[in-house]
Structure formats: C-alpha cells, structure tokens
Amino acid sequence: MVLATALAQGDEVRQGPGFLDRALQALVDGIQFGAIIAITAVGLSLIFGTTHLINFAHGELVTIGAVVAFFLNVGAAGPGWHLIPSALVAIVIGALFGGLIERGLWRPLRKHGTGLINLFILTIGLSLLLRHIVLVFFGTRPQSYREYDIQEALDLGPIGITPRDLVIIALSVLVLFGVAFMLQRTRTGTAIRALSSNPDLAEASGIDVNRVVLIVWILGGGLAALGGVFFGLTEIITWDMGFRLLLLMFAGIILGGLGSAYGAMVGSFVIGIVAQMSSLWFPIDLQNAWALLALIVVLLIRPQGILGQRERVG
C-alpha cells in the first residue's frame, strides 16, 4: 500500500501541472501578449482611420522604441539609466519620429495628390530603410535585459506570473484605458473620431485636419515605442523585432474592425490569447499561424470584424 502510494505520488510529480492549470497559464500569457499587440496596434489603427494609409513602417517604430530603451538602460556605450527614464525617452523619441515623418513626408505627399497605393508602397520602402539603419547601428546579435530575464514567479494558485509580466499587463491596460478616455472625453479625441468617420464633414465643421493627423501620428509613434519596450522585456531584442510583430498587429486590427481603435484593442487580445492557447496542442512555432487562422474564421462569419460596421452600398 505504501509502495503504491509512493508510486502514485511519483507519477503525479512526473506528470506536472494538469491541463486546466496549463490552460490558465496559457490564458495569462495570451493576455500579456495581446496587451503588447494592442498597445502597438491601436496607434496603427488610428493612423489608418484618419488617413486611410496602411503604414507598413509601423513595426520599425516598435523596434526603435525597444532599441533606444535598451541602449540607454544596459547598452555597452549607454549611460546606464534606470529602465523607467530609458522607456520614457524611448516613448518621446518614438512620438517625435512619428510626428516628423508625418510632417516631413506624408503631409507633403498628400498635398501633391499622391495616391494611397503609391503611399503604401512608400511605407514599404521606408520600412526597409529604417530596418537596415537599425541593423547598421544595432547589429545582428540578439540582446536582452539581463536584469529582467530571470525572475521568480508570483504563485497565484494554478498560475505563476513574474513581477515584470504583471507590471506589463497592468501598464498596458492602464494605457489602453487612457487612450479610450482620450477618444471619448476630450476635444482632440472627438476630432479624431469625427475625422475617422467622415473626413469631408469633419473639415467642413472647422476641424483642423492636418493638426489632428499630426497628433495621431505622434500618439501612434509613442504607443509603438512603448509596445517595443514591453516586447523587448519579454522577448529578445533584434533589429527586425517590430517587423515580426507587424503581421499580428494587422491581424488584430482587421479582426477587430478596420479603422476602429476599440476593435484593434479587442482583436489584438483575441490574437494574443489564441496564439498562446494553441501551444497547448501544437508546437509553439505555429502559434502565429493559428492566430491568423482564427482571423480567417472570424472574417468568414463576420467580414467587417468584431466591432467593425458593415459598409453600405449605394
């Protein structure tokens, strides 16, 4: 009897956590991953909503945020700042860069009547240019925050979460609520929603379209940089990390509904959760593929996305 009990306990130890425990852990990991996607995707969605431009270079703003924060915090030639001021500087640089490319590139091109297809192709070229500039300065060697790589997980019943991941989730949710508050409760947010809904009517109503678009690009650049900092804390930092996240950003935006900031938030969380939950049954290398499959299934059922509105014809 004692031997049987010991063997049973040994089998339990070897089996590890049960399926439900692993599912709950994957759900928490998915919420964290979805929060990072949402932080980066909401700015991209606002840019599309106000300009109808598909910005293929948005991923590079994510990379710039991650690289700048890493350089200031632990880079060999950096000042060795604490992570918080390093992240704040990265956000400011991302916001300024977003405003700069809007003011210096996209606005003049729009004034010259450049078509959206041509602008989209230019975003691809800008993406390649920025990516290789980062490659020249950062190099091909992956880097990581050694101080935050290994942390003791907080035991929350069937799940475990590190303080790093808990802070990332909390800050991401706080920032997303802040964006939602801005869109609903401020004059700037009202102008952004009006411009996204009907650009001609917004301009006729006296809204300064150029000013609103500039604010959206600044906001989008800052959010992308913040997402890059979070992504760099949870993954290795590479010269093309933003590009690797770009497809999931687009997936979250399309799943939630094109042009809807709230849809981008919801869609991004769905993509992140599906990606992580799929690892319960399939190899982790396929997690992004299953997230995209979920996108296809939802669009087959609801073509306008989760929170998108069906376009009227005629």
Image: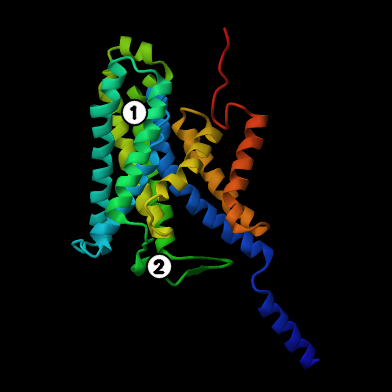
Q: Nearer the viewer, residue 308 or 90?
A: 90
Q: Eyeballing the image, is 82 above or below 115?
A: below
Q: Which is more N-terminal, label 1 or label 2? A: 2
- Quadrant of image for the N terminus: bottom right
Q: Eyeballing the image, is 109 above or below 228?
A: above
Could you say which disc has been placed on residue 149 in the image? Answer: 2
Number of marks present in the image shown:
2
Q: CA distance from mark 2 to mark 1?
A: 38 Å
> Which residue sits at x=43%, y=53%?
169
Q: Nearer the viewer, residue 87 or 25?
A: 87
Q: Secondary structure at mark 2?
A: helix
Image-based side of 270 in relation to 3, left or right: left
Q: Position of residue 105 (x, y in %)?
A: 27, 27
Name the residue type under label 1: Gly
Callout 1 environment at 10 Å: few (<14), some (14 to 19), or many (20+)?
some
Callout 2 environment at 10 Å: few (<14), some (14 to 19), or many (20+)?
few
> Which residue sits at x=37%, y=11%?
200
Residue 193 seen in the current view:
no
Judging by the rendered image, the residue that carries numbered circle 1 is 189
Q: Secondary structure at mark 1?
A: helix
Residue 175 seen in the current view:
yes
Q: Position of residue 253 (x, y in %)?
A: 49, 35
Q: Nearer the viewer, residue 77 or 231?
A: 77
